Image (cartoon, rainbow, N blue to C red):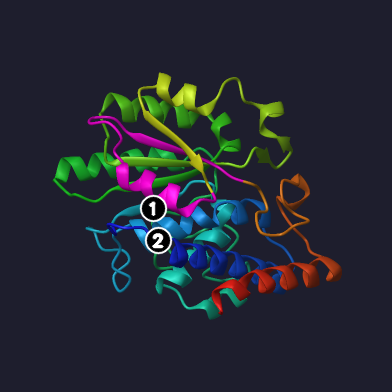
């Protein structure tokens, strides 16, 4: 992990990830735009500022591990792998095509840099527990990071894993929840949110921090501080905006899965390119 936060580089990385997301969806005609855009800053900080990963050997045993539990956010992961230099940008032109290495959910058998195939919600945290236990048993020093959505917190498997992680003192496990407050069928607090995520994870024995999920410096500092308490797994509640970066898509459930028409496609490309001028100066 880098000792200091290069906010400019991480913000630029997040923008580039969003640019990959938007251009890929526009070119392909569809994709899970809203949730991918909300977690772009998180992925930039992890891949470009925090995780120890050899880009030439992305599957090396000693590398930090990343699991994208909410696999439908995969365009953000693909963009991060491009920015890290693990994957060539050209492959995004085949997104979700038959036989593509970048399908609509990440497939570890098809793309280097993908640690585990995901998509069925609620599986990422249990998998992360397995990696963390394996590291402790073998004396490895790598950390395991799991990115989840707030909507998938309704899955019971998460809470079994949360109890397991706390009981087994998995301080090498860091979970991140992209709390954008929307899921496929509406607002999370109207569907299944019996109490705050901070309260629930603390009750399960985790150390918890809540941050602005679009503030790269706050994210970096939170990751750098993990584990927050000895002998406890850590969870970062990253408060985000679904569709972040596109004015018409922000906090709008309609763009969970986005099929842009010609007008929206042109506006999206115009907005993302206009935003990018900041890093071209």
On the image, the x and y values in percent for residue 225 come to 31, 42
On the image, the x and y values in percent for residue 74 come to 55, 58
The residue range painted magenta reads 214-240
How packed is label 2: few (under 14 Cα within 10 Å), some, or many (20 or more)?
Answer: many
Horizontal relation, residue 139 to residue 34: left or right: left
The secondary element bearing badge 1 is classed as strand
Q: Which residue is mark 2?
A: 47
Q: Are marks 2 and 1 in contact (CB under 8 Å)?
A: yes
Name the residue rendered at 79%, 72% in the picture: 266
Image quarter of residue 165: top left
Name the residue rendered at 40%, 31% in the picture: 208
Q: Is residue 110 visible?
A: no
The magenta stretch spans residue 110: no
Tell me, for residue 66, which label it has, or none: 1
Name the residue rendered at 27%, 36% in the picture: 171
The secondary element bearing badge 2 is classed as helix
Tell me, for residue 151, which label it has, or none: none
Q: Is residue 40 visible?
A: yes
C-alpha distance separating marks 2 and 1: 9 Å
Name the residue rendered at 67%, 40% in the picture: 183
On the image, the x and y values in percent for residue 37 come to 61, 56
The answer to whether 196 is drawn above or below residue 233 in the figure is: above
Which label's residue is closer to the chain start, 2 or 1?
A: 2
The answer to whether 148 is drawn above or below residue 164 in the figure is: below
């Amino acid at each position: 992990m880098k000792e200091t936060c290069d906010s400019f580089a991480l913000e630029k990385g997040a923008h580039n990830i969003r640019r990959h997301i938007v251009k890929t969806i526009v070119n392909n005609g569809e994709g899970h735009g809203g949730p991918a855009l909300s977690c772009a800053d998180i992925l930039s900080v992890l891949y470009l500022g925090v995780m120890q990963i050899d880009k030439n050997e992305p599957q090396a045993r000693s590398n930090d591990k990343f699991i994208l539990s909410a696999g439908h956010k995969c365009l953000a992961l693909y963009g991060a792998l491009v920015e890290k230099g693990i994957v060539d940008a050209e492959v995004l032109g085949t997104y979700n095509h038959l036989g593509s290495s970048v399908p609509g959910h990440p497939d570890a058998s098809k793309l280097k840099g993908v640690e585990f195939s995901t998509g069925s919600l609620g599986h990422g945290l249990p998998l992360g527990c397995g990696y963390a236990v394996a590291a402790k048993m073998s004396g490895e020093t790598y950390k395991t990071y799991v990115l989840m959505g707030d909507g998938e917190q309704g899955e019971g498997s998460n809470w079994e894993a949360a109890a397991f992680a706390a009981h087994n003192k998995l301080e090498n496990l860091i979970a991140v929840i992209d709390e954008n407050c929307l899921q496929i069928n509406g607002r999370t607090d109207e569907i299944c949110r019996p109490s705050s995520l901070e309260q629930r994870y603390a009750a399960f024995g985790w150390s918890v921090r809540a941050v602005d999920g679009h503030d790269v410096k706050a994210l970096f500092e939170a990751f750098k501080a993990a584990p927050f308490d000895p002998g406890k797994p850590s969870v970062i509640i990253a408060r985000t905006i679904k569709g972040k970066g596109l004015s018409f898509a922000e906090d709008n459930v309609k763009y969970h899965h986005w099929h842009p028409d010609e007008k929206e496609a042109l506006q999206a490309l115009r907005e993302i390119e206009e935003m990018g001028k900041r890093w071209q100066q």
